[in-house]
Structure formats: structure tokens, C-alpha cells
Amino acid sequence: MSGKQSFITLSELNELIKNAIIDYFPQPVWLVAELFSMNIHKSGHCYLELAEKSDKTQKLMAKSKAVIWAYQFNLLRTYFEQSTGMEFAEGIKVLLKVTPNFHEQYGFSLIISDIDPTYTMGDLARQRQQTIQSLKDAGAFDLNKEQFLSYLPKKLAVISSATAAGYEDFMKQMANVIEQFNISVCLFPALLQGQGCPESIIGVVEEIYDRKEEFDAVILIRGGGAKSDLSCFDDYNLALNICYFPLPVITGIGHERDESVVDLVAHTRLKTPTAVAQFIIDRFNDAEAVVFQYQEQLISLIKSKMHLARLDLAKYDSMLFRRTYDRLSIEKNGLLKVENRLKNKVSDFLMQQKIEVRQIEKSLAKECLSLTKSKLQNLNLVQSKFKDLFFLLMSNAKKELQFLEKKVELQNPENLLRKGYSITSQNGSIITSVNQIDINTEMQTTLPDGKIISQPGKILNK
């Protein structure tokens, strides 16, 4: 640089910049930015990095330092969290009231003096509604609800964290029924909040897809938390994977005030991990109750049928005895009548033969008077033939009578008793099976020469 050199010092330049900023920004301005990073100093001051990203590419377009002084930080954070239900943390977009500030030593920064929580709520709601509409436009919103959920889902794939309180609550609730109903629970660990959460869950979903034949349903659970912790469940790509998954997805993400997009597209949404466990348990308990009800009805029906069968058997047994006894009486009376008729016929026959013989004798006597001695031999011959015929008729009649008598005797129950048989009855009914015997009631045994009254002592089955 020739001649008289013209320059300023760094402090002078910084002073100029500081004054220019003060002149250009005499009042604070409202600024939209994302909380890119945050560090709370032990002094209570909150040091931030604010960022702006492209809506389409998420490429970083601008970044700036910012600070909330300790006397304001707790007030602003409490106000924001109470208003939004979200934690004041990295990754959320906020509307801040800032004053641009340039310090000669520390450079440029933004001094935050206020925050508008309604913007953050509106931005999240807008993004959430946009995701829901995109899923509906793609025809995917209700796809997982159409998947068949087994009435008794026994093979469960659980997406959670092994150390998460929600997973512990779920397993504690399920502990009593896992062995009872032979339920299998396979844990697929994943990140459930923060950056990388959607990608982590999507990776686990793809892993389950490769083993989808092994499971009846997928369960996505985590405990409660701030809205910012749960914002990953509004992610479009994660929700789209849930929509197209070929197994029913049950969620218990643990927040009750509103539903995430994943809740809305899942097959079944429940409030908490414990509620998911109870949902599964209730299905098994209901099925068990139905089985017990049918079992009791079946037992009652069988008992009723057996009782009716016993009544019918007793009725038929009594009827058979009466009919047998009546039939035997009828047959006996019939045989007696046959016997009487036979005796009468034989008697009549013999009487007739006697009359005829007498007539022949009279005729022969008369003829003998007129016949010569030479005819005496013929008379003897005739008499001999008559005797043979008479004896033959008598022999045949006797044989027939004996046959009928034997037939009558064979049908006589008293003969059966004389052969060693006996008839046992109880309460007027003949005993044909040990199952009919009442050990508290006397029994009557009929023998050829009398009856025995006895008390059953012990019954032995074959």
C-alpha cells in the first residue's frame, strides 16, 4: 500500500459492525428457526445453535449462535413446555423473539427474550396433518386395519427397548399368562425417541418382515414421554411401513392426550403397554371362559342324557320282567290247557275204544254162537291183531303225552330253580346287573324251597 496507509483496527471494525446492527435492529424481531443444539451452562444460561433447513432436502441453509440468559431461561422453558406438552429440546422448530447482538470479543449472537409456543404446535400439527393426508392419498391409510388379527395371538413380535419401563410393564402384566397359554414373545430392540428413531424402527420392521411366518401380530410399545420424544411416531416413512405391513400392528405408545400417525394407521391402538398386555390377556381369558361354559353345558347335557337313559333302562327292565313273567304264565296256562285237552282226548279215545271193544265183544259173542269150532282160530287171530293195534295206539298216545309233559316241565320256572338257579330282586325289580344294587336296601333271593332276605355288603365288578 503506497503513500499514507489508511486502515482501522479489528476492534474498530467490530465496533462499527455492532453499531450498524444496533442501528438496523433498534427493536427485537420474531425469528423462526430449529433448535439445532443446546447447552445449559452451570450458571443457568442456555447456549443454543439455531438453524434453518430446506423443507424439501433438509439441507442446512443457515446457522447462528443464540443465548437465553439464566433469569429468563427457566421461565421461558416452563411456559413453552406447559403450553405445548413438549420438551424444550433439540430438533423442534420454534418462533423466538430475538435481539441481534454483536460483541467485540465473542462475535455475533442472538439474544432470546421470548418464545411463542403456538407456532411450534401449529407447525407440528401441520406436518402431522400433511402426513395423514399423504397416506390417504396413497390409499395406504387403512391397509393395516384390514389385516386379520387372530382371536388368540400366541406368537408376538414386540418392538421396544429391553430397558424401557414400558416393555417391563408389558412383560410384568403378561408374566402370569405366557406359560399358561403358551404365548411366545420375541423382542426386537429399537430406538424409540430422538434422531434416528424412525429409521431404527423401520429397520426392525424389515427384520420382522423377513420372519413374518413366525408371528401372529406385531406390538409397538413404549412408555409415556414429552411430545418431542414421541414426534418420531408421526414420521411419514415409518407410518407408511406400518400401513403396508402384512401382519396386524398393535400400538401402546403411552400417551393419552392425542394419537400419533402410527397409532392412527395401526390395526389396533391402545393407550399404554399395560393396556396392550391386558388386551391380549382378555382375548385368552374370554376364550377360556367360553370353553369352560361349553364344557359345563356338555357335562350337564351328558348327565341329563345318562339320567334319562337310566330311567329308560329301569323302565324297560321292569317292563321286560313283567312281560317275561306274564308270558311264562300264559305259556304255562296254555300248556295246562293242552295237557287237559290231551288227557280228555285220550280219555275219550279210550272210552270210545272200550265201547267199540264191547260192541265187538258182543258181536263176536253172538257170532261165536253161530260159528263152528273151525272159526275159533280166526277169532283168536282177530283178537291178537286188535290187541296189537290197541297197544300201539296206547303207546303212541303215551309218548305224545310224555312229550307234552316234558315240554311243560321245561317251561316251568320252578325247574330252573331246581337246577341251581335263583332269582334275586330288590324293591320288586329283578337284579340283572351289579350296577342296579343299592347296598342300603334289602334283597330277596328266590330258591326252589324258599326265599332269602339279605343285606348287600360289598359289590365287586368284573
Image (tube, grey):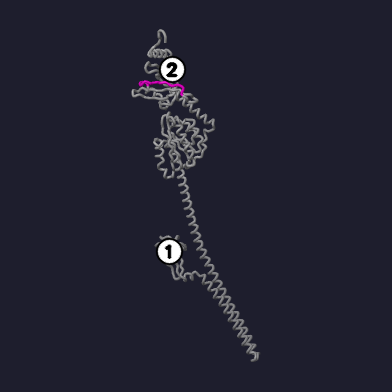
Dominant secondary structure (helix, strand or loop) of the stretch shown in magenta: strand
Element carrying mark 1: strand
Kindly identify which numbered label has been placed on residue 443.
1
| Residue in front for this viewpoint, 208 or 120 | 208
Residue 131 image position (x, y, % from top left): 50, 29
Name the outermost residue toward the bottom.
Answer: 373
Residue designated by label 2:
29
Q: Is residue 343 visible?
A: no
How many residues crowd mark 2 within 10 Å: few (<14), some (14–19), many (20+)?
few
Total label count?
2
Residue 425 image position (x, y, % from top left): 45, 64
| Residue in front for this viewpoint, 390 or 112 | 112
Check if residue 91 falls in the magenta segment.
no
Name the outermost residue toward the top.
Answer: 3
Find residue 404 and report its image quarter. bottom right
Kindly identify which numbered label has been placed on residue 142.
none
Q: Up-down: is 335 above or below 2? A: below
